[in-house]
Amino acid sequence: MNLRVVLADDSAVLREGIAGLLRDEGIEVVGQAADGQGLLQLVGEHHPDLAVVDIRMPPTHTTEGIDAALTVRRCFPGTAVLLLSQYVETENVMNVFAGGTAGLGYLLKDRLTDIDGFLGSLHRVAAGGTALDPDVAGRLISRPHRDRVALDDLSSREREVLTLLVEGCSNRMIGAALSLGERSVDVLVRAVFDKLGLPPEPDDHQRVRAVLAYLGPTVRS
């Protein structure tokens, strides 16, 4: 599938850098915007497969990108959204995830130096999956939670698996990251869901949604 993407970031240098990278990969960049209003106009005009959005844009550089992403999610459900941020921001960003995680991602801009990883996340989100930055996932796992006992009951290895699940990793990806065989990963994933009281799902993205739903009340508190 030939992906059609719009980019929104007030840094023209960063926009052009991402645009060039995507074009080199055969991805069509149908428009670029420097603010949230421009992004919404582009999405309404082109109906792209994916919008790559900086969470902080003019005029206040606070939540304009997040607000625009929420509008895209509500008014243009056929367009996936990949949020980018210079710093870890959880509360406002995770409110976007509260409306559903399919076709939604959040990465730190530092990840752009890992071209293969960035492109993999971009394609996963555009295909309806989920991508969450490892630093963000780690912060969510470590924060106080309404059911701290359940999280404390996880072994160190199970916490590693939970972090990878929140990032959107499949069992195969978890195995590669932790140097584990398929059977070992299956056992660990089942243990994580059992201890958290979450039924395992056959689809990786459904499992990610379940984990994010479990962590969500903490993020929004």
Image (spheres, grey):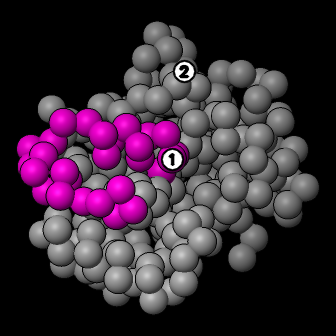
Please name the residue that numbered disc 2 is placed on. Answer: 57
Instruction: Please state if 144 lies on the left or on the right of 149 as rendered.
Output: right
Residue 51: tell me if it is visible: yes
Q: Which amino acid type is shown beneath numbered disc 1?
A: Pro
Secondary structure of the residue carrying numbered label 1: helix
Instruction: Please state if 155 lies on the left or on the right of 205 as rendered.
Output: left
Magenta-colored stretch includes residue 148: yes
Q: Which residue occupies the foreground of this view, 203 or 80? A: 203
Q: Which amino acid type is shown beneath numbered disc 2?
A: Met
Q: Nearer the viewer, mark 2 or mark 1?
A: 1
Q: Residue at x 50, y 15 (%)?
A: 61
Residue 122, x across and y down, in percent: 63, 57
Residue 198: tell me if it is visible: no
Magenta-colored stretch includes residue 96: no
Q: Quadrant of the C terminus?
A: top left
Instruction: Please state if 199 lies on the left or on the right of 171 as rendered.
Output: left
Please name the residue that numbered disc 1 is placed on. Answer: 134
Residue 47, x across and y down, in percent: 58, 57
Q: Residue at x 64, y 28 (%)?
A: 9
Residue 116, x across and y down, in percent: 76, 57
Name the residue at the right extreme. Answer: 24
Q: Residue at x 44, y 83 (%)?
A: 184
- Mark 1 and mark 2 in contact (Cβ < 8 Å)? no
Estimate how packed mark 1 is, as few (under 14), some (14 to 19) or many (20 or more) residues with alpha carbons within 10 Å. some
Q: CA distance from mark 2 to mark 1?
A: 23 Å
What is the quadrant of residue 120 in the picture?
bottom right
Q: Quadrant of the N terminus?
A: bottom right
